[in-house]
Image: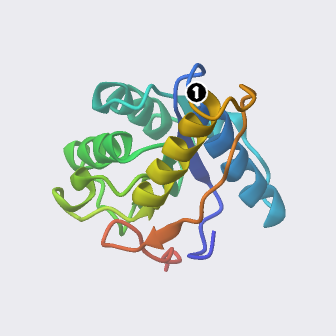
Amino acid sequence: IGLGHRRIAFIRAAAHHRISETRYAGYRDALLHAGLTLDDALVADGDLTFGMGIVASELLLDLPEPPTAIFASNDDTAAAVISVAHRRGVQVPEQLPVAGFDDSPTSTRLWPQLTTIRQPIIEMTNMAIEMLVHRFVGGGAGSEQTIYAPYEIVTRGSTARIVPAP
């Protein structure tokens, strides 16, 4: 949004993954906060794999009015978007910026390197261990809870400002 894109597609995780709902909610809320319309045609379902990322990318890029950018629920799916774009002769990021989530090793092993969301994995692991210890050793309650950790946007070569048509 900050780079001028208005038709931003989103590739969701499979419905049974908790991140499917939370990452989609972040996408939806960002669009609405910016005054953009949520277009269901720009949301494709995936399953966090490269293979389903290919299928979702093809679906989105085959739209009569394709997206100007794609945000994927994880880096493997975003890598699939870049692969499909290259195969179709679509330049990333000039014609199609792509961003992912997780800052996995994949994000720096492709070209262009992937803009992504980095999570504090060590801190998240420590929180999970503390919760498990409290629950199983300390006799704590077994209720499910969601904790949101701080994140960092890692900008690399796969995103760019929209270039207006001449």
Q: Is residue 11 above or below residue 85?
A: above
User: Quarter-wise, where is residue 155 in the image?
Assistant: bottom left
| Residue 93 x %, y % | 35, 66
| Residue 144 x %, y % | 72, 30
Q: The residue tagged with tag 1: helix, strand or loop?
A: helix
Q: How many marks?
A: 1
Q: Which residue is mark 1?
A: 136
Q: Quadrant of the N terminus?
A: bottom right
Q: Left or right of 139: which side holds 61?
A: left
| Residue 124 x %, y % | 50, 52
Q: Left or right of 111: which side holds 58?
A: right
Residue at 42% over, 44% down? 74
Residue at 49% over, 80% down? 166
Residue at 55% over, 35% down? 132
Q: Is residue 159 above or below residue 91?
A: below
Q: Is residue 14 above or below residue 27?
A: above
The amino acid sitting under disc 1 is Phe
Q: Nearer the viewer, residue 68 or 126?
A: 126
Q: Nearer the viewer, residue 82 or 121?
A: 121
